[in-house]
Amino acid sequence: MLEFRQVAKAYATPQGPLEVLAGVDLDLAAGESVALMGESGSGKSTLLHLAAGLDLPDRGEVRLAGQALSSLAEPARARLRRETLGLVFQQFHLVASLTVRDNLRLQARLADRERPDWTAELIARLGLGGLERRYPEQLSGGQQQRLAIGRALAPRPALLLADEPTGNLDEASAGEVLELLMALVREAGCSLLMVTHSPRVAAPLDRCLHLTHGRLTTPASGRDACA
């Protein structure tokens, strides 16, 4: 589903180029869930942006659903994102002028994959029944994050990319949102790559990877694998 081959990325700074990724290799299989961990500033969000084709590597290759992203012009990458990806960020990025129902329908419509039955199921599973006509500002933070997750999953994407999806929530709400996210990912049948700093959030996923000094490492297996 997602492949990185010797991917490198650097950014210009007043002190010179700062290499964030230094030859990253990654394989994410269809239906697999992977947690990406690392210290703040280690390049986790950069890796996610490259996976989505929102940025391109300086060296190496990123392949999404078999397509080499560097070989595609931006319109083609945008189309591949619409058809293949769901994106969930720490900031909700909901459309303020759209109701709960229309926020959910938006991404599915853009992908030409709207299914009223799945939309109705998402509303029920997200705990948003009776709130369909409300606007994002009329929802709590937890409700907004659940809506953002539902919007990303509405077109039943092949891959969900999530950047600290519970980072803005209190512990109780974060636990509920994480449990819901994992259940819906399984039901949608999609792969998941989630950036998180929390071992508790990472623990339910199939694998954990750590990003350190620009490279990915696999921690020891067992109870402490995501620590």
Image: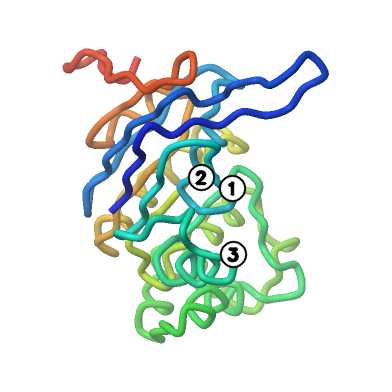
Question: Residue tagged by mark 3?
Answer: 74
Identity of the amino acid at label 2? Answer: Leu
Q: Earlier in the sequence, mark 3 or mark 1?
A: 1
Q: Earlier in the sequence, mark 3 or mark 2?
A: 2
Residue 175 image point, x, y percent: 43, 37
Q: Earlier in the sequence, mark 1 or mark 2?
A: 2
Q: CA distance from mark 3 to mark 2?
A: 13 Å
Quarter of the rendering occupied by the C terminus: top left
Q: Furthest residue to the left?
A: 222
Mark 2 is surrounded, within 10 Å at the Cα level, by few (under 14), some (14 to 19) or many (20 or more) other residues, namely many
Residue 66 image point, x, y percent: 29, 59
Question: Residue tagged by mark 1?
Answer: 55
Q: Residue at x 50, y 26 (%)?
A: 21
Please say if the residues under marks 3 and 1 sit with CB atoms less than 8 Å apart. no
For this rendering, which residue is in front, 122 or 48? 48
Q: Furthest residue to the right?
A: 14
Question: Residue tagged by mark 2?
Answer: 50
Identity of the amino acid at label 1? Answer: Asp
Mark 1 is surrounded, within 10 Å at the Cα level, by few (under 14), some (14 to 19) or many (20 or more) other residues, namely some
Q: Is residue 127 visible?
A: no
Please say if the residues under marks 1 and 2 sit with CB atoms less than 8 Å apart. yes
Element type where label 2 sits in the image? helix
Mark 3 is surrounded, within 10 Å at the Cα level, by few (under 14), some (14 to 19) or many (20 or more) other residues, namely some
Q: Nearer the viewer, mark 3 or mark 2?
A: 3
Q: Residue at x 37, y 74 (%)?
A: 121
